[in-house]
Image (cartoon, coloured by chain):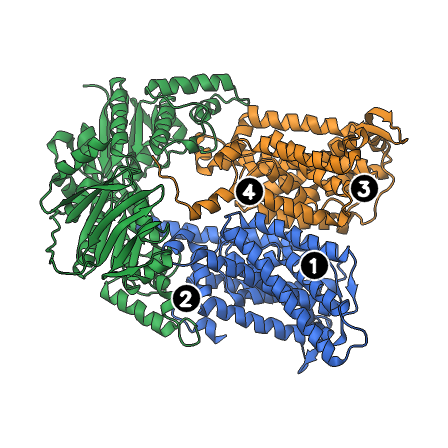
Chain colours: A blue, B green, C orange
Amino acid sequence: MKILSNSPIKLPKTKDNNLNRLIIISIVIFVLMAILNPGKFITMRNFRSMSYSFPELGLLSLGLTICMITGGIDLSIVGTANLTSILAAKLMVEAMPENPTSAIIALYIFLAVGVAFIFGIIAGLINGYLVSTFHIHPVLVTLGTWQVFSGIAIIITRGYAIPNLPKPFLFVGNGRFLGLAMPLYIFLALAIVVAVLLRKTQFGRSIYFIGTNATAARFAGIRVRKMLMRAYVSSALLASTAGLLMISRTNQAKADYGRSYILQAVLVNLLAGVNWHGGFGRVIGVAIAVVTLQFLSSGFNMLRFNNFARDFTWGVFLISIMIFNHLMNERKNRLEADIAGAKSVE
Amino acid sequence: MIAPLVEVKNIHKRFSGVYALSDVSLSIAPGEIRCLAGENGCGKSSLIKTIAGVYQPDEGQIILNGQMYDNLRPIDAIHEGIQVIYQDFSLFPNLTVAENLAINSQLEQGRKLVNWADMERTAQSALAHIKVDIPLRSRVETLSVANRQLVAIARALLHNAKLVIMDEPTTALTHNEVDSLFEVISELKSEGIATLFVSHKLREVLDISEKLTILRNGRKVSEGETNEYDEASITYHMTGRHISGNQFTFDATDDEIPLLSVDKLGREGAFENVSFNLSSGEIIGITGLLGSGRTEVALTLFGIHPANSGRMLIDGREVLIDSVDAALKAGIAYVPEDRLIEGLFLERSIGDNIIVSILDRIKDRMKFIDFKKASSIIETWIDTLKIATPNSENPAQSLSGGNQQRVVLAKWLAAESRIFILNGPTVGVDVGSKLEIHTRLRELASNGAGIIIMSDDMPEVVQNCNRVFVMHKGQIIREYKDDFVEDQLISEIENLK
Amino acid sequence: MRKLLKTHESYIAVILIVFSLIVGIINPKFFSIGNLFGLLKSTVVTGIFALGVLLVLISGEIDISFPAIGVVSMYITGTVFEAIDFSGPTILAFLFSGGIGVLLGLINAAVISTFRLPTLIVSLGTLSAYSGFVLTFIDTRIINRLSEPVVVYSKLAFFRRTMESGQIAELHFSFFVYLALAALTALILRYTIIGRGVYALGGDRQATKRAGFSIKKIEYFIYCYVGLLAGLAGIIHSAHVRNANPFDLVGGELNVIAATVLGGAIIGGGRGTVHGTLLGVMLITVINNSLILMGIPSYWQRFTTGFVLLIAVAIPQIGSVKSIRTPRRVRS
């Protein structure tokens, strides 16, 4: 991606070490899974199946990345994804007239996607408003809105799934274009959009400043509230897109789908080197991290690990990554402290 | 001759091969009030930490109460009566005064359970000791800075302190509060408790201390009775240079339209009827007691708390400043309290720091940030201000203090700011850096900027401003201009109390 | 705002009373002795978890792994005791479950304290790891045949009386266990050095160290105590529902955190009381259990919890929003 390297303003070099480390981890896991699953892992079929499943998590993770760069977090992404996609499904399935023509179907799909995005924006505005204006801890806000959004989703569906979405809509999650999975195109397109957004727009640059030092950002004239609102809205829009992908792929909308995605999205971001305290994080890292996690997940599947074993491994993996990063940073900090000590001698 | 309380001899302390302390000796007698002065980075903190057992010296001896320590631990230092009051006081904001005072004693006794009655008794006697009255049950976060400091001092004395080390104790205090702090210190002296007072405020050093030790670059460069020194000689020893402050002057031309006109500006509950003019090239000061409304005026001028009444004119045209954005667009820059470099993003690149305020002005037709334009602006200012860095992509924290200040300046200049509001620009800054900041401000003024300094540092205001306004209870009550003397101003402020 | 916080507990109490009155007016059954006893029993599990959460919040962190600890402790206890056909004293089942809880808490503490990682992230990981562990390595079936002592405990109740309607009203013993644990927690927080250390840690980490506290000790204490409480809450829950279900409890963490925050504990640390937590738990329980009494379907529960949490955290902040618009008072 040229846009990521062609600018004079680069993140500190140390963060690139993080990326190198990530690439190595990714390769190691890939090779390991290939060895453990001879003749099964490196197959067209596996790659294709992976390319259908990781984009959902990828989009959710990108949303989280944006919020984490501001120094916040968005735990409500899965709630937002479920709520907005249920509203869309409701419209496509229950509001659809009988024996629709293909034009009517297209219109309803179009409307449904619009509804999902509109409610995504509303969800993001609620989060952003509570975080930026009420100054409530983002963890609390988004834990609360997560419940509220999935609560509304449950109220709407009464806990039942909404199945049988219109055929053409299923193409988004299951179709192929030029031999590649549709979800892959959607992920790539949005990853590029987010990368450009973060790298090349005033909004993107501003949230890096906010995440580094919110007070200084305010005095530098950055509109902190507005930018935070935008960050949470962006996150919610990405979540809505992920939600639409989910219901399209599974051909049903459920209020409690994808709960474990939250943990995984946090895991992806930490793996990608997105700074927990804000200010640093790159789309390319998130993309590699999410693919890496998919290698691991697919490999486990082939080894006939069940879902619970995967939960267990995710948990252990998350903590291991945190410890590993901590140890690396500590080494780096010790070096820097030595240098700083030598420089200022205080 | 009384046996010294603390004696350190020929201390050396290295960090990664660089000397933080080199051959420093210091001897403090019981009841003595000693001042340790020096610029940031001179080794003051290292010396304090050595005496407190936090750092182990590489060479040299530490003798406390006649007892020589090869490996002094913090707990030993405490047992020998050494108490350090750190700048942040190390208090618990969420706990009561009583608990803050007495929890250490409870811990020291190795207790498992808390004896609240005992705790309150201890706390009560601790406060009585320094003759202050602070409600024991109020939470520390509700106290003023001065009261928090008194709590910290009272706590230190609970441990049979023989030497109280205070690290920059007056930084956040008002004149009155500094006076009462000094009373407490004298009180301690009468009880035979010594004080080691770390400061770089020359006037205070001269006011309170009996003996003075000055460090520079890790070496002791001067020591003696305080009455043998004056401000100039202390400054010389601290910096190694002769620094003479010269008065800032400004030649006004009458018929000119002022750069900034503030006309009957008011904000409900904060200040009212504030009017003044600021010409290009001028540096004016606004002073007053804490709570006089000067900070509120600054925040209003910068659009953080917009005004309810009155108007502002720039170049004679009325402007509406209702947000920070509007202020920046109008060419107003603001530096918050604390240091000049508080406005920096330390972990971000130098380049990022320079363009942070002009992101919306360097967009191309596609609304994207134009990185070519950005980097040419960055290079221009790095060249113009001679910021010493091999690469604009290095993080700002890699720069020295002086260069960091230049980065802040570059940010403003890139934003084409012409009116600078500085709130306490040199609070907590040592003599050398202070001078650099003042020089920088005068440079700015001579380049056509108008500068407003909000400060209660009288010498600073007097020396660097050609006019000074005194605020009290939300109003401007006096304007000093042309030939005015510091004492006049100080006595005026004193009378307000 | 400070004034509001000072009286936070009384403010929650007022809301609790007003809300109860409203529910009682809509459906007088609310004030029946049977319902009230039932309510008290349903506060127990949430409440015991909340006492642990309280400690973590006071210390300035957020832990979400406690339901997983609860479920692991309870399910392993169930499995083991079923296998050996245990018939000893009930207290042993409690100690066993609590002990497993402490061990899991110890793991949390070791990771958090040794590597100084944020509790939220660590517990997100351990939440997943612990419950994944049970389901992978122990079993996935629901144990319906609890060991004898737990069954005995599950029937332990007081003030039994038959209502006019023929229903039996009784106050389960668990409520007294809960009160005892609450009292113990309150005493620890108020009267032990380590309890004050928890507040100190939430107030200022650096100062805690300088005052001579061992931060490591405090952290180990907090997470082991949380583990103990979670283990006990797990076994009590198991007795209440008379089975051991490895899919249980996890997912209820927010409810508990919401209750604790409602009770006046603050994210960011330094503040929170046991009696506030008791009130918060009571309020959340009343709200959740009364939906049905008021004729609102149970699938509203999740929404209500989230909504109440948001309201509870937003109210103390309204002052800060206002101060943006109106001038701040001048410091004197």
Instruction: Using the numbered discs, state the Cα–Cα distance from disc 3 to disc 2 in whole angstroms.
Output: 55 Å
Q: Residue at x 32, y 35 (%)?
A: B50
The residue marked by circle 2 belongs to what chain? A
Q: Residue furthest right?
A: C166
- Tell me which amino acid carries mark 2: Lys
Circle 4 is placed at which residue position? C315
**Disc 2 with disc 4 on a shared chain:** no
Which of label 2 and label 4 is nearer to you? Answer: 4
Circle 1 is placed at which residue position? A258
**Disc 4 with disc 1 on a shared chain:** no
Mark 2 vs 1, N-terminal side: 2
| Crowd class of label 3 (few under 14; some 14 to 19; many from 20; radius 10 Å) | many
Task: Give the numbered dot on residue A10.
Answer: 2
Q: Is residue C14 above or below residue B382?
A: above
Q: Is residue C8 left or right of residue C173?
A: left
The residue marked by circle 3 belongs to what chain? C
| Crowd class of label 2 (few under 14; some 14 to 19; many from 20; radius 10 Å) | many
Instruction: Using the numbered discs, state the Cα–Cα distance from disc 4 to disc 1 in whole angstroms.
Output: 31 Å
Task: Give the numbered dot on residue C244.
Answer: 3
* Secondary structure at numbered mark 3: loop
**Disc 4 with disc 3 on a shared chain:** yes
Q: Is residue A104 left or right of residue A207?
A: right
Mark 4 vs 3, N-terminal side: 3
If the image is split into quadrants, where does the C terminus of chain B sit?
top left
